Image (cartoon, rainbow, N blue to C red):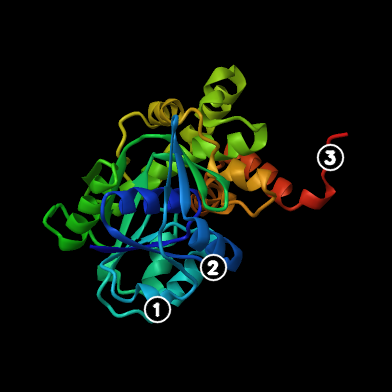
Amino acid sequence: MKIGVVGPGAMGGLLAVKLARAGLEVRVLDHRPERAALIGRQGIELLTGEEEVREMVPVTLDPAALGDVELILICVKAYDTEGVARQLQALPSGPYFLTLQNGVGNVELLGKYLPPEKILAGITSHGATSLGPGRIRHAGVGDTYIGLGFGESSEEAHPGLRLARTCLAAAGFATRIVPRICSLIWSKLMVNVGINALTALTGLRNGGLLDFPATERIMAAAVREAVQVAEARGIPLLFDNPLEEVRKVCRQTGPNISSMLQDVLRQKKTEIDYINGAIVREGEKLGRLVPVNSLLTGLVQTIENSYEQRVRTF
């Protein structure tokens, strides 16, 4: 079975190694020539607990190299989704496309350029930390869910969903199929709303957020606002208790450095506009105040827009 992975960052790198070690033929698409060259020479190194493995996987800068794969996993940052979709639209109509990204809006962007019937969406609570180009730490195990990108289906025999679940399970990602994509994406959004901005602002690992009463209070308030927005939109969530789900993910991925904190530490653009910022936009549409998410969004935006002005350690 041939699988494409777009974006060999933390999650993409983790999946590429796990899928390759499960015996699948993996090809990685990158947009950074230096990183692609490094991975081409040295492979991807994965650290899990005390175990360290190195897997050689083919990496390319040419989207056409994915032309004969059966499934393409989209693992880029949300702000790169449209560019990737444009690149992939010239491929033959054969592969399914599974987004495993943070935030909301990725499915819709993919659907502008790719066959909607071929688009799948997924969320995973597995934690992955980038230790540098081609070097990943698997920092926590969690739940994984997938569903159709457009439309609703409870048919687990859908060929694309069955293919994706089989591949993810082979990689060690126990995966459940769910019928409603909005529920899927918004449920993951609750987790990201509660964790990512707070870790980016405090510098704490995921588990560290539970060690301080103040971060727990802010987490609870941000998640409560997000749940209220989802309810106002009529979007049912997968979890009976979203806040407890956020806490569970914090515990399961305790050593993980969230993707947003990784971006801040590397002085890169974050996905804040697609996470807490998405709650702010939806709240505005509904005429609802979401002050905690507004504050978290503004603070992270200020950080990412002021890297060159920040006071350095003496």
Q: Is residue 108 above or below residue 23?
A: below
Disc 2 crowd rating (10 Å Cα; few below 14, some 14-19, many 20+) is some
Residue named by callout 1: 64
Q: Is residue 158 above or below residue 145?
A: below
Residue visible at 61% across and 41% down in the picture: 261
Q: Would residue 103 be visible to someone looking at this image?
A: no
Q: Amino acid at mark 3?
A: Arg
> How far, Cα to Cα, is label 2 from label 3?
31 Å
Q: Nearer the viewer, residue 4 or 22?
A: 22
CB atoms of marks 1 and 2 within 8 Å: no
Please give left or right for residue 86 compared with residue 185 in the image.
right
Total labels drawn: 3
> How far, Cα to Cα, is label 1 from label 3?
44 Å
Instruction: Classify the position of the C terminus by image quarter.
Output: top right
Disc 3 crowd rating (10 Å Cα; few below 14, some 14-19, many 20+) is few
Instruction: State which tag comes first along the sequence, 2 or 3.
Output: 2
Task: Name the secondary structure under disc 2.
Answer: loop
Q: Amino acid at mark 1?
A: Ala
Q: Amino acid at mark 2?
A: His
Residue 126 in picture, x, y percent from top left: 39, 39
Extreme right residue here? 314
Disc assigned to residue 31? 2
CB atoms of marks 1 and 3 within 8 Å: no
Residue visible at 24% across and 47% down in the picture: 170
Residue named by callout 3: 312
Residue 269 in picture, x, y percent from top left: 64, 54
Q: Quadrant of residue 217?
A: top right
Disc 1 crowd rating (10 Å Cα; few below 14, some 14-19, many 20+) is some
Task: Name the secondary structure under disc 1.
Answer: helix
